């Protein structure tokens, strides 16, 4: 027992780090390696839709290694640059919109009393208790030409004809905001809750205006939360599939949604 305790005391930290590293290796790195080796093989119709990169057959060792897939990027670059550019643009502005909404909300939660703070955090997490697909369908019901928003505006006499909100960048941004806003709020809250009121009071006592306090004290200290929240939103937003598929149109083709039949026919052999 004493030897075991000494071993745990000596190697305990390494063991704590090794377990999550092993998890990442199995469920993150190995799938990336599989995708990487698939890019060097040939496509085929069937399951799986690609030939094995290497293996052993009746004639011994064989390999299907080639660079034709990367040659397609050069031959049909216009089919890939457009969706990639749309993905980066929509993901960037979606992240910015989430940040603009999340920053004051996180500040309000962090500065609330502990009892109210717990309730507000539960409300932030509440959307995760329902399927994101259901939330997107609910948003469709709001943004449709005959949806709640247009119907209410026409009932009040504000507009005469429905406003086109679906299949636009606006609908994509609203879907991203609805889905990823909690992922921006939580890192910001985690940073803001650690801000000492004495720092803000000291800056105000030294003559700094509210804008000066924000720019010189609050913003620099909350920058790690901004970076963490932006990464949590931007990275999945780039490869988002459901939101552009349900809310976007032909002008909102993103990497996750991109599947032009013409490109597929160029890659897959014809039956």
Image (cartoon, rainbow, N blue to C red):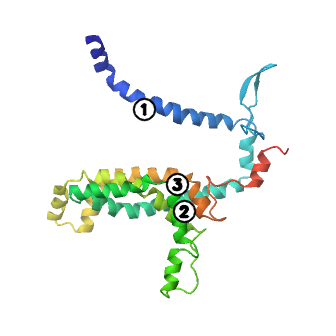
Q: How far apart are marks 3 and 2 (CA)?
A: 18 Å
Q: Distance between the residues labelled 1 and 3?
A: 25 Å
Q: Name which residue lies at 27% across and 67% down.
A: 211
Dot label at residue 237: 3
Q: In which quarter of the image is the N terminus?
A: top left
Q: Residue 212: percent from the left, percent from the top?
A: 25, 65
* Mark 1 nearby-residue class (10 Å; few <14, some 14–19, many ≥20): few
* Mark 2 nearby-residue class (10 Å; few <14, some 14–19, many ≥20): some
Q: Measured along the vertical axis of the image, is residue 158 above or below residue 210?
A: below
Q: Picture quarter containing residue 270?
A: top right
Of residues 71 and 145, the one nearer the viewer is 145
Q: Residue 260: percent from the left, percent from the top?
A: 72, 55
First in sequence: mark 1 vs mark 2: 1
Residue tagged 1:
20
SS assignment at label 3: helix
Q: Nearer the viewer, mark 3 or mark 2?
A: 2
SS assignment at label 2: helix
First in sequence: mark 1 vs mark 3: 1
Q: Is residue 43 left or right of residue 32?
A: right
Residue tagged 2:
137
Q: Which of marks 1 and 2 is in front?
A: 2
Q: In this view, does 64 lie to the left or right of 17?
A: right
Q: Is residue 10 left or right of residue 51?
A: left
Q: In which quarter of the image is the C terminus?
A: top right
Q: Name which residue lies at 53% across and 79% down.
A: 151
């Amino acid at each position: 027992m004493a030897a075991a305790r000494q071993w745990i005391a000596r190697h305990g930290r390494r063991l704590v780090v090794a377990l999550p590293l092993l998890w990442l290796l199995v469920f993150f790195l190995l799938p990336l390696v599989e995708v990487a080796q698939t890019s060097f093989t040939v496509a085929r119709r069937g399951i799986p839709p690609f030939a094995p990169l290497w293996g052993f057959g009746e004639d011994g060792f064989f390999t299907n290694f080639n660079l034709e897939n990367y040659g397609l990027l050069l031959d049909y670059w216009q089919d890939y640059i457009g969706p990639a550019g749309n993905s980066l643009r929509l993901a960037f502005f979606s992240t910015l919109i989430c940040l603009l909404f999340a920053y004051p909300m996180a500040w309000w939660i962090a500065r609330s009393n502990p009892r109210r703070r717990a309730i507000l955090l539960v409300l932030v997490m509440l959307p995760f208790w329902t399927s994101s697909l259901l939330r997107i369908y609910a948003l469709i019901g709001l943004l449709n030409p005959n949806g709640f928003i247009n119907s209410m505006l026409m009932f009040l006499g504000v507009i005469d004809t429905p406003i086109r909100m679906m299949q636009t960048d606006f609908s994509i941004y609203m879907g991203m905001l609805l889905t990823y806003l909690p992922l921006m709020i939580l890192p910001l809250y985690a940073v803001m809750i650690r801000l000492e009121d004495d720092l803000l009071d000291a800056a105000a006592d030294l003559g700094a205006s509210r804008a000066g306090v924000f720019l010189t004290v609050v913003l620099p200290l909350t920058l790690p939360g901004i970076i963490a929240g932006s990464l949590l939103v931007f990275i999945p937003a780039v490869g988002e599939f459901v939101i552009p598929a349900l809310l976007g149109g032909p002008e909102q083709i993103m990497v996750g949604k991109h599947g032009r039949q013409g490109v597929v026919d160029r890659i897959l052999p014809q039956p």
